[in-house]
Image (cartoon, grey):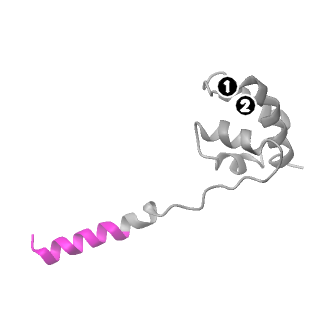
Amino acid sequence: MTKTLLAAAAFAVFIVAAPALAQDEPVKLKDGPGKDAVQAACSACHSLDYIPMNSPFLDRARWDAAIKKMIGPFGAPIDERDVQVILDYLARNYAPQ
């Protein structure tokens, strides 16, 4: 390969990959009591994108079930003392009204 062809190939790869390399703004959760507990517990295993993404579908009971699923089958390291705080925050800020 000539240098020009190699440079063109490298540039093409960069152009195709650049959008994947660009990071979107991190999810900014709504302020309120329990936000810190939610950020710490949820981001330990997955992106916080899941919270607003699922908010149209999860009422308080479904958030409760989701938290229990994360702790039980998925083994999330959530302190039992934080469960109610997390549930209250999610139900107050990310459940259909």
Residue 59 visible, this orientation: no
Main secondary-structure element of the magenta-colored stretch: helix
Residue type marked 1: Ile
Q: Position of residue 2 (x, y in %)?
A: 9, 74
| Residues under numbered marks 1 and 2 in contact, where contact means CB atoms less than 8 Å apart | yes
Residue 62 falls left or right of residue 72: right
Residue 72 visible, this orientation: yes
Residue 76 falls left or right of residue 89: left
User: Residue placed at 68% from the left, 43% from the top?
Assistant: 39
- Which of the 4 image quarters holds residue 9? bottom left
Residue type marked 2: Ile
User: Residue placed at 76% from the left, 45% from the top?
Assistant: 35
Q: Which residue is mark 1?
A: 71
User: Residue placed at 66% from the left, 39% from the top?
Assistant: 40
The stretch in magenta equals 1-15
Residue 34 falls left or right of residue 75: right
Q: Which residue is mark 2?
A: 67
- Which of the 4 image quarters holds residue 75? top right
Q: Secondary structure at mark 2?
A: helix
Q: Secondary structure at mark 1?
A: helix
Q: Gap between marks 1 and 2, in whole Å?
A: 6 Å
| Of residues 85 and 3, the one drawn nearer to the viewer in this rendering | 85
- Which of the 4 image quarters holds residue 88? top right
Q: Residue furthest bottom?
A: 4
Q: Position of residue 96 (x, y in %)?
A: 85, 48
